[in-house]
Image: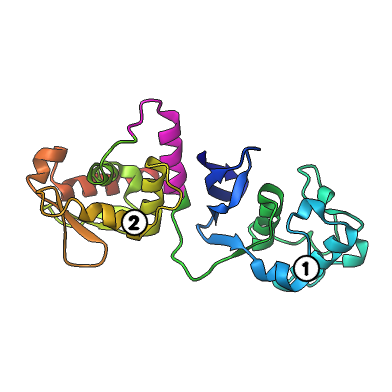
Amino acid sequence: MESAEWHETVFVIGKRTNAGTFDNGNCKVFDKNGYHWIVDQQFYKKLELPEDPCKWDQAHVCTWMKWAKIEYNLTNLNITESTINGKQLTSDNFCWNITGLEDKSSKDDFWTHVCLLKTMHKVYIKQNDEGCINIHALLNYKNKMYSNSDFNHDVEIWQFLLNLLTDSEYQNVIEWIDNEGTFKIIKPNTVSIMWGLVKNNWRMDYNKMASALRYHYGKGIIERAKGKHVYKFAGDIKTMIGHSPMDMKSMFQQKSKKGT
């Protein structure tokens, strides 16, 4: 079964195991800022700890804390105070009253790392080499989709994009750029994950989504346009959406200003 879920500070999309937890080998994980996190295979190779932190003993936890002290710049962390095992560390009731953490911001990557220890039972690290996804837009779309029992998962890719373009909630990930039906996908990683949610495919990425778009080329529906991640609807777009695209974009911008 494939699913998407928000855990404290992380968004997870992928397959669940029979026990109901996410399968670490078949999922994508993002933090609240939209950065992608992956299992740190080097951590396990270097330190030779059990893969599941729930199975760590006190010595294993101390080894992990020494690593975390360097990885997350926990300069004041007092490791000698630690007398906990992995089961306690990953418990929802565990209280982090360890000297050196009291001034660590709740926004710090260390706490995302800890959240993933608890929810995914693996050591994750942040990837900084990818474009961030828009978590707000993604959660908004996921919640709308899951709350609508009549949601149409058989929608075509061009209909999916048109729906985003005509909804003010998604103007930060996709936008009209002229009155002829031309638009740009501003956040391709975000939009492709949203399309993956529609098609129940956690592996969806921009390349796979673009391939689905190419299927419609030459059929009088949608075509590539000049520019990166730029496409154009064929036909009378004003008749299709009831407004000229740029008028619609202007309305969305005015709505956003009123909401701030």
Residue at which label 1 appears: 48
Element under label 1? loop
Magenta segment includes 138: yes
Q: Amino acid at mark 2?
A: Lys
Residue sitting at x 83%, y 56%: 56
The segment highlighted magenta reads 136-152
Residue at which label 2 appears: 208
Q: Is residue 81 left or right of residue 247?
A: right
Indicate whether 117 appears above or below 155. below
Q: Residues within 10 Å of mark 1 (few under 14, many from 20)?
A: few
How many numbered circles does the render carry?
2
Can you tell which quarter of the image residue 98 is in? Answer: bottom right
Q: Residue 140's spot in the image, x, y percent? A: 43, 41
Q: Amino acid at mark 1?
A: Glu
User: Which of 48 and 120 lies nearest the eye of the viewer?
Assistant: 48
Indicate whether 153 appears above or below 49. above
Can you tell which quarter of the image residue 208 is in? Answer: bottom left
Residue sitting at x 62%, y 38%: 18
